[in-house]
Amino acid sequence: MFVKLSATGAVTLEDRDNFRAFKLVVEGGPEKLDAARRALTGTAELPDQATAWIFEQALRQRTEIAQDATWQGNLGAMIEKARPHGWIDEQKKAIKAHIEWAEKP
C-alpha cells in the first residue's frame, strides 16, 4: 500500500490491500519537500527527502477503511512484522516508509 500526495495536495491511500509494501509517493521532485511536509501535517512527518513516518491513526481513520475490520487487522499484523526491523516509532505511533518522488516528464 502507499500514501500518495498528488500535485494538487490531495492525500489518498492507494493499493490499500497490499500489506507487503509500504511507501509514500509524492508527485513532484524532492524540491517540493517543504510543501509536502505542510500538506501531510497530521498524516506523516518527513525528516528528510528519503524518509517518511506515517502516523498509524492517519491510516486507521481514513473514511474508506475505518469500519473495515479485516483491513484494520491486516494493518496491525503488518505493524507487528515491521516492529523488529525498527520501522515503528512507538512514541509517534508511526510507520517508517521510504519516499518515492514521482516527477512528471
Image: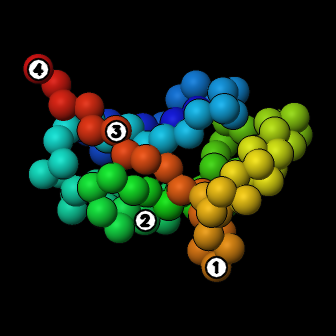
Mark 2 residue crowding within 10 angstroms, few (<14) / some (14–19) / many (20+)? some
Report, in whole angstroms, how far the alpha carbon at label 4 lies from the one at label 3: 15 Å
The single residue placed furthest to the bottom in the displayed view is 91
* Residue 61 visible in the snapshot: no
Residue wearing tag 2: 45
Identify the mark nearer the N-term, 1 or 4.
Answer: 1
Q: How far across and down, in percent of the image, does residue 33 sit? A: 22, 56
Residue 47 drawn above or below residue 74: below
Q: Quadrant of residue 57?
A: bottom right
What residue appears at the point 19 percent right and 38 percent down from the top-left corner? 28
Q: Amino acid at mark 2?
A: Glu
Residue wearing tag 4: 105
Residue 55 drawn above or below residue 18: below
Q: How far across and down, in percent of the image, does residue 76 sit? A: 81, 50
The single residue placed furthest to the front in the displayed view is 85
Which structural element holds mark 4?
loop
Q: Disc 4, disc 3: CB below 8 Å?
A: no
